[in-house]
Amino acid sequence: MIRSRSHRLSKPKREPRQGSLARCTLVATLVFIEVLCFEKTDSAALMNYKTTHYKQYAFIQLNNSFTEFYCLDDLYTAESRWNPKAKNGSHYGIPQGNSKWLRKADPLQQIDWGIKYNKERYGSMCKALQHFKIKGWH
């Protein structure tokens, strides 16, 4: 009987691993994939939830004014990315105010402080944003 050339070049079939080593390898791979895929997603979702919560609070404090909120959002995103632990020199918190009190204040107090500051100094959030765009600070 003559064997075909393709038959001689084919690789021998390997039997699948059996036993505890194969199961251990499979479990370790699945755990590794879960840690990579889901661990970061959960922490990112948690951080996103906090930022969303801060933005909703600011919107309510601005009497549901979309115009004022969009200006404040642009301003705080540029200054701190809505991070209550942000620090730039002697400036702290979400509004990046020059007050050591902001370092210890909770995020909602920081937002209240920033809105009050912008209203008293500039008259509105949009005027504060306009000043920030021209001068690079507010």
Image (spheres, rainbow, N blue to C red):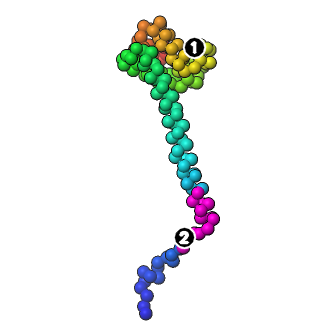
- Of tags 2 and 1, which is closer to the observer? 2
Residue 84 picture location, percent across and down = 55, 23
Q: Is residue 128 above or below residue 23?
A: above
Q: In which quarter of the image is the N terminus?
A: bottom left
Observer-nearest of 4 and 111: 111
Magenta residues, start to end: 15-27
Q: What residue is shown with label 1?
A: 98
Q: What residue is shown with label 2?
A: 16
Q: Which residue is drawn at 36% across and 19% down?
A: 66
- Mark 2 crowdedness (10 Å alpha carbons): few <14, some 14-19, many ≥20: few
Which amino acid type corresponds to the residue marked 2 in the rendered image? Pro
Q: Which residue is drawn at 45% across and 9% down?
A: 119
Q: Can residue 18 be seen in this view?
A: yes
The earlier-in-sequence mark between 2 and 1 is: 2
Which amino acid type corresponds to the residue marked 1 in the rendered image? Asn
Q: Residue at x 39, y 17 (%)?
A: 64
Q: Is residue 17 above or below residue 89?
A: below
Observer-nearest of 24 and 12: 24
Judging from the image, what secondary structure is the residue with disc 2 in?
loop
Q: Residue at x 59, y 13 (%)?
A: 99
Q: In which quarter of the image is residue 91?
A: top right
State yes or no: residue 24 in magenta. Answer: yes
Residue 38 picture location, percent across and down = 52, 44
Residue 60 picture location, percent across and down = 43, 17
Residue 121's label in the rendered image is none
